[in-house]
Amino acid sequence: MYETSIARKSSEGKVQSLWEHSTNVAEISNDMSHFPNTSKLLAYLHDLGKVSAEFQEYINKGGEPGSVIHAWQGAFLSNEWLPTDCASEILIKEIIGFCVTAHHNHLADGVAPDGTTNYFDKFLKDSDPKYFLDEIKGKISESEKAELQRLFEHAKPEVNGLLAQIKEVYKNKSSANFALGLFVKYLFSCLVDADRLDAYLFDINETYSNQPFDWEPLILIFENELSEFPIDSNISIIRGAVSDKCKAAADKETGIYQLSVPTGGGKTLSSFRFALHHSRQYNKKRIIYVIPYLSIIEQTGNTLQDILNLPDDNNVIFEHHSNIVEPEDDKASEIRKLSAARWSSPVILTTMVQFLESVMSAKSGKLRKFASMADSVIIFDEIQSMPIKAIHCFNEVVTFLSKILNATIILCSATQPTLESTQRTNLLLHEEAKLIDCTEEFKGMKRVTVSAESEKDCETASDFILEKANVNGNCLIIVNTRKSALEIYNRLKSKTASFKILHLSTSMCPNHRVQIIHEMKTYLKENEKVICVSTQLIEAGVDISFACVVRAMSGLDSIAQAAGRCNRNGESAVPKIVYTFPLKDENLDRLMDIKSGKEITEQIIHGKNDELDLLDERVMATFYQRYFSGKDDQMDYPTAEGEWIYEMLSGNGYGKRNYKNRTGTLFSHCIPQAFHSAGENFSVIDKNTKSAIVIFGESESLIEDFRKQPTGILTKQKAHIMKKLQKYSVSLYEWEWKKLSEQGALDILDEETAILLLSGSYYSEETGVVLEIIQDDLII
């Protein structure tokens, strides 16, 4: 059956047998999966429906893609053939159902949160003639059936071992249930990745090979470059000590660690140095560096590329971030083969948005990357930037990655949030959670003090900023909303001609922001008089040092991060002053994390002893204690429908209760998780956004080149241009793109990918996207 059936045919008429495809998928799965027999079983079942005469005719003669169902038959037949004598057997059959039926689409809900959908009811419809089950059963030989049963028997100890591991690792039922759901997602990810990879290799006429990456050459280059760094200042001595301690810590076993280093202490290279040596020591497959903001991903990428002596076009570091969402439709094989779905490079540089929305998704295209996270070192830079709504889900994901999938997790911050102390206590840190202790190194180095000032409006704030800039020679002002940034920027422009005034926000495309940051650094280096007005995108990780920083009141963690942009390298032996004050009429009603942090900071300021330093670790601990207090429900990610994503992916008790209320019967299956509903409701940033390409820099010539490309297919050249255009895109909120559409400012660049193009007259070389109105509740 497997040998005589065709799995796919190329446009040139080359064919791949179902046996070859299934065997290849099983081999790839075996190499990548922590549960190889279970993954091989899924591999041999996932395309079983392709043996039907109807599908073979479709392959040979063509037809509408998806018109002949082939993904459900393997689940139906395993449900009929395989035993259900124990809990693990029942669970394996349910996993087969979820993974096999969804491998071209998305994981379904076991039961929907409102109780209306029970995925398992679909198994009652296996007699539908569209599945051709009787025909398929007649084509499967006894030896093939026996092989499937043999794999099933070998899968049982793997699943039993996983269940025992979950029981040992997790001390509460909610976390254990969440882990079971992640187990399903992981197996699904392995299947999808192996299936897509084999299809890609068939299309390009190559065979699969699995060569482990050799970290030694990278380490030699890195260490050689590091040894050339000058040790000519107090801060460079401290950075060297931090780096050496991180290297020494590389022998620590796999686990979840916290790396707490004050701003400017060299966390990027120190954490990466740890990751390189740890990866060699424990045979990790890759290093994944997760960054909070797009504004610093290029800076970090350039830093790593330079110290590793890599050219721009290299196969070691892959940057995965995009404001242009490529289609996930499985029919678009050209797009699939050229996409960045695999995360197979040795070093991945990505954003928190990409990471969270990949692991929380149920879609095959996004979740495919989950398999690549196993056996890795994952560094989360500026972990304090994570939205509060995602904390409990994040904790479960990284705990599963570490405890079950052998990943080492590093949580980096100058203001380490107490994620392990939330109500669910579901971040299972290593017993010795501190990766290193650098308290002594920074004890005698005080670079800034924080001065809390009285409330100001944009007019008086502008006067205050200008006064401090005149005293210090330069000044950075950080505010909470784009409206405030634009207003203060315009007021400063009208008040002074002696300072260069710069603006920085996500109204500007990534390349525009990179250009502004470069200009800013040049002005500071040449002692030019410069003032920069920015939203908070500058305060996490941007390597820049002003003589004076002014921060609109916000969370104490943000104020500390802002302080890290002042006297960063100890240019002044005398501590410089960071000023903070409430900004009048700043609307934070839709920015609840910032609003809450601001209120708590004000409480601490009003209640503190005048002698107490606002940047003291004890004060920061008090801030986080109050900030997290009473937010347990928020950390479970509430939805607009009054449900919680955490619960959907854990026991889904709400869905099961609703199911019982609707049907009068209990939900009796092992996997109740509402994978699809959770994925559809989860987003790190507002989903009501659209991306648009702006006219800036070389984007105009790239757009011309793009329009010359053939339509309907994604060529390598087209994909290359799209990748470049990512750096000229902005995210528009719903009200923005509607307003711009009404004015005729938006056009469709490409129908296939629905990429929008913003008219050049609606983009400013100074401040980015130009609108007739500016809403007052938008953050970076």
Image: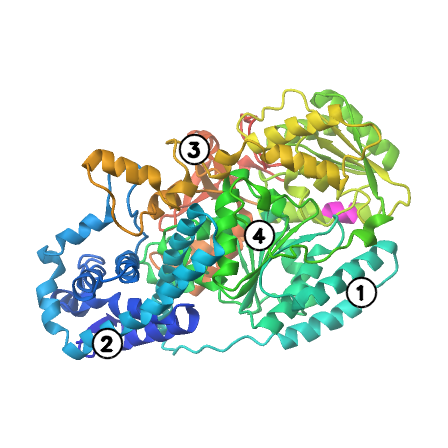
Q: Circle 1 sits on which residue?
A: 229
Q: Are marks 4 and 3 in contact (CB under 8 Å)?
A: no
Q: Which residues are magenta?
A: 519-523
Q: Earlier in the sequence, mark 2 or mark 1?
A: 2
Tag in front: 4 or 2: 2
Amino acid identity at mark 1: Phe
Label 2: few (<14), some or many (≥20) within 10 Å?
A: some
Of labels 2 and 3, earlier in sequence is: 2
| Residue 370 in view, yes or no | yes
The residue identified by callout 2 is 147
Can residue 532 be seen here?
A: no
Give the distance between the C-alpha atoms of the residues marked 2 and 3, in whole angstroms: 59 Å
Q: Nearer the viewer, mark 1 or mark 3?
A: 1
Name the amino acid, label 3.
Ser
The three-letter amino acid code for the residue at tag 2 is: Glu
> Looking at the image, how many numbered discs can be counted on the residues?
4
| Location of residue 244 with respect to 428 vertically, above or below | below
Q: Residue under circle 3? A: 741
Q: Which mark is residue 698?
A: 4
Any magenta on residue 296? Answer: no
**How far apart in space, not on screen, are marks 1 and 3 (Cα)?**
52 Å
Q: Which numbered disc, 1 or 3, marks the residue that appears first in the sequence?
A: 1
Mark 2–mark 1 contact, CB under 8 Å? no
